Structures are given as C-alpha cells and as structure tokens.
Image (cartoon, grey):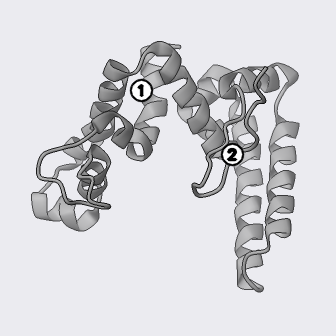
Amino acid sequence: MRVAARVMVFAALASVVVGMAGGQQPGGGFGKGKGGANDYFGLVNNGQVKAELKITDEQAAKLPAAAVKALTEILDSGQLKRLKQIYLQQKGNSAYLEKDVKTELKITDDQAAKIKTALDTQAKEQAAMFESGGFDPDRMQEIQKTATANVQAVLTPSQKTAWSKMVGETFEMKGGKGGFGKKKKDA
C-alpha cells in the first residue's frame, strides 16, 4: 500500500489508537490516571482547549499525521496492516467513502453516491428507532443488515473481493463498546 494511502487511513484512526503508541507521558493524571498520549490527543482536539492553547487549524491538521508517523515508526508492516484492517471493520460501511478506500477499490462517483444514500437511509432509520422508543437490538441489527446489503449491491464482484482482502479476518473486541464480529478459530 502506498505511504500516502496509509497516512490517510491512519489519520482518521490516530485519535482512537494513538494511545497504543504513546505509553506514559510526563505530567500525567489525565483520563483514567494514565497520562498517555491518547489523553493529550483528546485534549488538543477539544474546542475549548484548542482555544486556550491557540492551536491553529494548520497545527490541528498536522496532529493526526504526527500520530500516524509515531505508529509507523513503532509498529512493523504486519502490525500496521492488521491495525488498518481492524479500523476498516470498525468503520463498517462508512469506510467505503474514505478517499483511500474509494481509490483502492476504484469506487466510482455514482457508486459513492449510492453508498452515501444507503448510509443516510440507515442513519434516518436508526434515528427514527430511537425517537419511537429507544434502542431495540433486533431492529438495529435489521437496519445494519439492510444497509450492508444495499452497499454490497452497489459493488462489483471484484470490489467485494478486494474489500474482503482489505478487512481481513474479523476482529472481536472483548469487553469494549461492542464487538466487530467473531474471532477466527485457532487452526
């Protein structure tokens, strides 16, 4: 994968995983008391903190790239590839609209518009569900399944195959905010 494409994917991911690369930082006491890079990154992305520190838009734009650079210096290529796969799984259908994914899968403007429509419909249906009585896990699963089917219907067979290779084995995050699927059984 080209370095530029890797940077674009991980720029969005950096705010989620930069703590993995950062470890302990001086002057701790943030968040859960760890004082890690993720705590600092979260703070500098807070509007009030940005204003207090007078962080320019130019500086803010460089922060994700700096976090990505740290990841690429610490993780090997296999780890980076797997991290991207987990990120894409987490993003789900919305990942198809990210610039590097669209480029790699050769998603046309027409396909992107249809994917956006499917995602907008999903968001409206989820909002309606919450407005009409709250979270219903079965209904949520049905909405997500329909959105996925609508997105998959837009893709060509070669794009579907390429996507499967991009996301790799399904990753399950245990004890977190929802899993991404089932973990592959050991062979």
Indicate the position of residue 115 as horizontal and vertical percent values.
Answer: 74, 44
Q: Nearer the viewer, residue 92 or 186?
A: 186
Numbered circles on residues, count: 2
Where 113 falls versus 127 (above or below)? above
Indicate the position of residue 120 as horizontal and vertical percent values.
Answer: 70, 59
Residue appearing at x 25%, y 46% in the figure:
60
Residue 171 lies left or right of residue 9; in this view the side is right
Residue 21, which numbered label? Answer: none
Residue 180, which numbered label? Answer: 2
Q: To which quarter of the image does residue 67 belong?
A: top left
Indicate the position of residue 182 as horizontal and vertical percent values.
Answer: 76, 41
Q: To which quarter of the image does residue 131 belong?
A: bottom right
Give the spatial CA distance, label 2 vs label 1: 23 Å
Residue appearing at x 72%, y 81% in the figure:
134
Where 11 falls versus 44 (above or below)? above
Query: How busy is the neighbourhood of tag 2: few (under 14 within 10 Å), some, or many (20 plus)?
Result: some
Indicate the position of residue 149 as horizontal and vertical percent values.
Answer: 87, 45
Q: To which quarter of the image does residue 104 belong?
A: top right
Residue 41 lies left or right of residue 102; in this view the side is left
Where 16 falls versus 170 (above or below)? below
Residue 180 lies left or right of residue 47; in this view the side is right
Q: Amino acid at mark 2?
A: Phe
Residue appearing at x 11%, y 58% in the figure:
53
Residue where numbered disc 1 is placed:
7
- Which secondary structure, mark 1? helix
Q: Amino acid at mark 1?
A: Val
Q: Nearer the viewer, residue 17 or 155?
A: 17
